[in-house]
Image: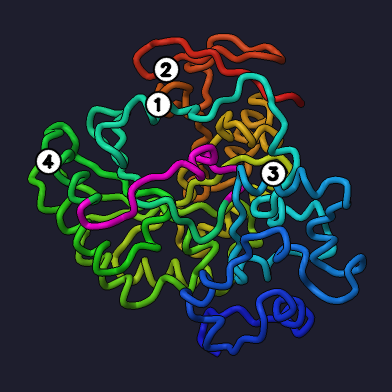
Amino acid sequence: MKQGALVLQPEVRARLRAIVGDFTSREWQDWRWQVRHSIRSLAALERSSPLERSSPLERLLPVRPAERARWRALLRRYPCRITPYYLSLIRWDDVTDPLRRQCVPDLRECEALAAVTADPLGECRHLVVPGLVRRYQDRALALVTDECALVCRHCTRKNFWRHSRPAPTRAFLRRIVDAVAHLVGVREVIVSGGDPLLLDEDLLDWFLGALRAIPHVQVLRIGTRVPVVLPMRVTHSLCACLKRHRPLWINTQFNHPREITPAATQACDRLLQAGLPVSNQTVLLRGVNDDFETLKALCNGLQQIMVRPYYLFQCDPVRGVGHFSTPLPIGIRLAEQLRAGLGGLSMPQFVVDLPDGGGKVPLQSAHIVAMTSRKVVLRGLRGERYHYMNACP
């Protein structure tokens, strides 16, 4: 077994085989095998063993016969994709498991909550060309693919999963490069998606090289959950590709300390050994990490593997994500507890991404104008005021 590989317990291996079929250790370490065998359908989520009502996956996804139509409608609207690797980390006998909550569909996603939108950050209004968003004067966001290794149930772009975007061909990416070349004020390009590390390596190499060749582009950044949900994708070949395009920063998203596995640690270490700084952007999620001890363990664990805790994000008010939201006062209190209980290198900054493209602001007194149980008035970076609806406690 390779160093950093996940050692599967016999019971977990047996359950996975009932879902994805038999597999070898070599196949398990192959990221393409993981992608091909990802869980995508209701049938796959239910399939585990002939003992249907006592099967682990039925406890993982308890579907009553009368609700099957609702579940099918949910998966048509908000697809599911879970890598076998991430599925192996879930505690099968606990329907409230924090890793389960992040990836297994929930009927609450269909509930219509007030003050939530399909595009809370106003990315559609700031679209330059398909796949390129500019919300800041000196930065641009390249959305290069729709594909993710794992479909996070709290995703900011959740309501665009079913929108057809051009495939990540060289022609599509060339249009993004040409647009960036004309945006002379842009010094940094954030490459995201979907997950850009799922792109064909040659195509990714070309795209990053084309961006670096633009004189005013000084820095590149990649947003990816691959080290967390598909760590075997971080191969020596991929790291060599990324290293060619430094200065390049990697931002990932660990949301719970149990995600810091030997395999994830090895993936981050390979990036670090290639000279690629790795930072983490945790999302504050109800029922996942909305307590001090969990966040403390997560931040200290990240520091231990030399991944910098960068941001703690208030969950965006996205349609279909309301059940993950925590009231802002809870997040502010947690941030205060973390400031008192963590060393400086373990301390993330608690921020909220303001509605309609207002940008990120730290949740500090200077940015809080007024706060009630229902609404918070926040001051943006240029003094504008934004109304942010509080989640129900």
Render colour scheme: rainbow
Mark 1 vs 4, N-terminal side: 4
The residue shown at (32%, 71%) is 238
- Residue 359: give its label: 1
Q: Circle 4 is placed at which residue position?
A: 181
Decide: is 81 above or below 2: above
Q: Which residues are magenta?
A: 152-171
Secondary structure of the residue carrying numbered label 4:
helix
Is disc 3 placed on a helix, strand or loop? Answer: helix
| Mark 1 secondary-structure assignment | strand
Q: Seen in the image, is 354 located left or right of residue 58?
A: left
Q: Amino acid at mark 3?
A: Ala
Residue at the image position 50 percent from the left and 61 percent from the top: 149
For residue 213, side relative to residue 24 (left or right): left
Query: The disc labelled 1 sits on which kind of residue?
Result: Gly
**Disc 1 to disc 4, how far (Cα)?**
23 Å
Label 4 CA crowd tier, 10 Å (few <14, some 14–19, many 20+): some
